[in-house]
Image (cartoon, rainbow, N blue to C red):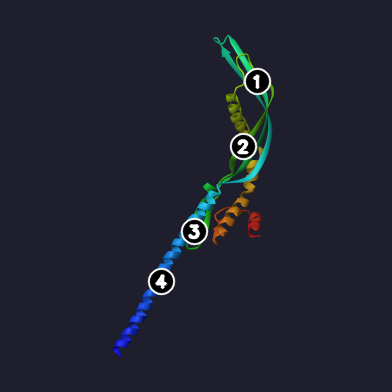
Amino acid sequence: MDDVLDAILGLILGAVLMYWLFSLFRRKKNKELTERQSTVLLDKIRNVAKLVSVEGDFAEIYHYENTKERFMSLFSSKKKALIVIKARAQIGYDLKKLDLKADTNGKKIILKNFPEPEILSIEPELQFYDIKNGLFNSFSPKDMTQLNAEAKEHIKQKIPESGLMDSARKEALQAVLVVEKIVETIGWTLDYSALEISESDQKLLES
């Protein structure tokens, strides 16, 4: 009789031990899976990299003039041109600058800060008019490269007064929604309560 009781007790203890080991292994596996999910998710958001919010087209007239002097400044040669700059500027957000934290227990991504909009690209197209070359000062391929760089800088200086940055800030909500959709793809949630969002924008988020 004692042998039977010992055998039953041994089976019960063995079952309890096996259940404890199985639970421990499952918790560890779930924790590793959750941590791996959060890492993959954060990388996925950052890999979206740059998100274009608004675009602006510019058309500017640029007067270019360059003078070279020779023979101890006794002679000078001038080249000049009238250049029409047509350019498209893209304003948006570098999502690699998002301040994101992962809460693996609550399965949520916490968005603590959203970056300011920035110029993502400027694509100029130059059209030359009234080109005049000097005697020993004419336009070269090197000048074309320099003029493209100057055109970009010229448009860059025009962007602040164009209102594009303000428009991009207003579109920031859409960027938050993009991040939220990415987070939801693996069943997590996005916590953006740390951000300052207006009542009208909050209604859009909840709709």
Residue 56: name its quadrant.
top right
Q: Secondary structure at mark 3?
A: helix
Q: Earlier in the sequence, mark 2 or mark 4?
A: 4
Q: Earlier in the sequence, mark 3 or mark 4?
A: 4
Q: CA distance from mark 3 to mark 2?
A: 36 Å
Q: Secondary structure at mark 2?
A: strand
Q: CA distance from mark 3 to mark 1?
A: 60 Å
Q: CA distance from mark 2 to mark 1?
A: 24 Å
Residue at image x 54%, y 52%?
45
Q: Which residue is mark 4?
A: 22
Give the class, few, some or many, for how many residues have Cα within 10 Å of label 4's Cα (few <14, many ≥20). few
x%, y% of residue 189? 55, 60
Q: Earlier in the sequence, mark 4 or mark 1?
A: 4
Q: Which residue is mark 2?
A: 122
Mark linked to residue 80: 1
Residue at image x 63%, y 18%?
79
Tags 3 and 2 in contact by the CB under 8 Å rule? no
Mark 3 belongs to which amino acid? Gln
Mark 4 belongs to which amino acid? Phe
